Structures are given as structure tokens and as C-alpha cells.
Image: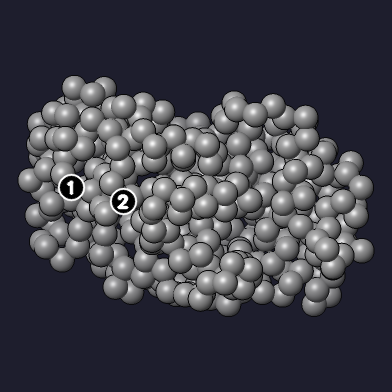
Amino acid sequence: MVRIVDVREVTRPISSPIRNAYIDFTKMTTSLVAVVTDVVRDGKRVVGYGFNSNGRYGQGGLIRERFAARITEATPASLLNAAGDNLDPDKVWAAMMTNEKPGGHGERSVAVGTIDMAVWDAVAKIAGKPLFRLLAERHGVQADPRVFVYAAGGYYYQGKDLSALRGEMRSYLDRGYTVVKMKIGGADLAEDCRRIEAVLAELGGTARLAVDANGRFDLETGIAYAKALRDYNLFWYEEVGDPLDYQLQAALAEFYPGPMATGENLFSHQDARNLLRYGGMRADRDWLQFDCALSYGLCEYLRTMQVVREAGWSLRRCIPHGGHQMSLNIAAGLGLGGNESYPDLFQPYGGFPDGVRVEDGHITMPDLPGIGFEGKSDLYAEMRALAE
């Protein structure tokens, strides 16, 4: 019988001098989690790994005090699938959420999502398959290992002038990206327009630009930016106001006919449903950015995708936030529209397995068991130190 013998967590720094319109990353942390099983594959104990996305701090306290303990204290058989030969992620998720009241989707959703990532990594490794292929088989989808990715960057930092910003974006083009993203809202409108125009000049029509306000604007400022941005033919205008201000999001459609994107700071399928009910999002052009690592994990993300379908949206309009390999597997396994990536930031947690290259804005998933963390040597070194 498969058993989880331990759940381990360590909080690691992913600090950086960069900032967006709302926060800086000088003291940012992440939780790295290992779910240790008693299963042996190729002479090694199977360990599943997970970590939370950037922008939310490590959740060591919640993981150790509540959620890990509920897993290790559960009856082992209660966490297994019907055949008894693997873990059932939904049963593990239910064990974690024992005695948790509904609502309150804050830091708790990050702690659960981090462990859930590690559970799915273990499940796919026990099955001997890449997670994206396991997901495709379970959901009757044709797995597509080729995934669209865009380069997220364009942060503010002291001394970064227009030349440095252009050089950063040029480096993404040189690495094969066809869509790049930059931050706005950390300067005034006139300065941000100069920054956007500098980047567009660098792109020269060979790639598209998305901009991200990180929820900074009130309605008046969001509309002022919308009026200025609508002539730039942007890939999207992202997270204009507070993520729970659906009325603000809905009002923007009157002033911004181009694509908009939001959702990375919504942490449940109920939040997603409210966005699609009340946020004025347009299924023919807008983008949904829910991040499983911040929103209770893949088990909840699957419920969110059902909400998306029921609202009449295609899953191709979903491009998750976070830039991690978990969402890459979900995109390839469920047929999403792609995934965010961080070519240079938040290392070693961002990026792709060693040897994976961006070609014409896409990467091809390698056939590595589980999520594929073992294929990224700098990240796997951190993981091995925790659990192997």
C-alpha cells in the first residue's frame, strides 16, 4: 500500500531589487515542499515536490501547523485511489481541508496549493508518466507537448533607464519569445507611455507587448490608462484594479476594446465564477490567469476550469500566472492557451528544464516523470537537499 511518510517544508528567499506597481521583491520568499512516499522507482524513493508562485510569501507556518499534519495523521488507506496502487489527489486535498470553513481564500489557498503540487508530482512519478500526459489521459484530451509561453519582465528598479528596458526586451526576442510583458503603474502615465513606446520600438513589429498594472489603479486612473493604451495594439492590458473589484473590471470594457487579462489573485472556483458573472470579461478576446499554486492547487483548478466551461469560455483563453512547470504541465495536458515564464527572475524556481528552448514563442515539454523538476538541475539541487 502506498503511504505518505512525511511532508517537509523549508522557506527559501527569492529576493530581488525589482518592483511592480504595488510591491517590491526585496524580502520575497517561497515555500519548498516535499511529499515523501514509501514507493521506490528505479532504486529511489519517490518524492513529490512543490513550491508557491512568486508574489505571495512562503507559507511554512500554515503548512507545518495545519495542512501537513492532517496528511500524515490520516489513515493511509483513506488517501488512496480505488485500485489502491497510487495516491488520490482529491482525497489528500480533502484531508488537508478537514475542519476548514468555506471562504477566506487568502494565505490558506497558497499553503494548500503548494502541497497539492507536490502530491501531483508524486502521483505522476508513481504512475511513471509526465504529469501532462497523465492529465490528458484522465480528461480525455489529446496531450500537446508544444506550449505557448510569453516572457514576463519589464519591472522597475533603481537606475533602470529606457535603454536597459529595451535591452531586456531584446534579450527575450533573441531567446525565441514572440510575446513579452512589462509592468506599468509604478510611474506616472506619461513616463509609462514613454516606456511602452520604447519597448514597441525595440520590438519593431516582430513581437507583441502585454502590460500589467498589478491591481494598482482606481477606476479613474484605469480609464485614463485605457484611453492612452488603446492605440498601441497591445497583447493585453492586465489586472487594472483590485482583483475583487468586479465592477471596476466591467466598467473598463467601455473604454478599452482591446484584450484584457486578470485572475492571478483569485484563489477559488467561486472567485472565478464571480469574475465571469460580474466582471464584464469578454470570452472572444480576454484572458484568464488563474494560478493553481496560489489557489488550492490542481484539484481546485480543475473545478475552476469547469466553471470556465459552464460560463461558455474556451480553456484556450486561460494562460496561468506564475511561470512554473506545474502550470506548463496543466497547459499541455488540458489544452490551455499557454503559460507565463520568467526567463531571468525568481530563480531557480522559474524557467524550464535544462535544454528546453523557446522556438517561435513555444516550448516542447520533455518526457520526464512527474512535473519534471529533476530536469532542471539548479532547482533539483534545492529539492534534493530537502528530502533525498
What's the distance in space between the residues labelled 1 and 2, CA to CA? 12 Å
Q: Position of residue 89 (x, y in %)?
A: 72, 54
Look at the image and tell me in which quarter the C terminus lies: bottom right
Colouring chosen for the image of the structure:
one colour
Q: Residue at x 31, y 27 (%)?
A: 247
Closest to the observer: 152 or 66?
A: 66
Choose mark 1 or mark 2, whichever is in front: 2
What is the secondary structure assignment of the residue under circle 2?
A: loop
Q: Which quarter shows the N terminus?
A: bottom right
Query: Residue 10 occupies which quadrant of the picture?
Result: top right
Residue 238 in the image: state x and y as whole percent: 29, 41
Q: Which amino acid, by three-letter code, is at mark 2?
A: Ala
Please tell me whether residue 203 is drawn above or below residue 136 in the rendered image: above
Residue at 58% of width from left, 77% of height from top?
367
Q: Residue at x 43, y 62 (%)?
A: 336
Residue 283 is tagged as 2
| Residue matched to label 1 | 258
Q: Secondary structure at mark 1?
A: loop
Could you tell whether 225 is left or right of 105 in the image? left
Task: Give the left or right position of residue 45, taking residue 238 as reference.
Answer: right
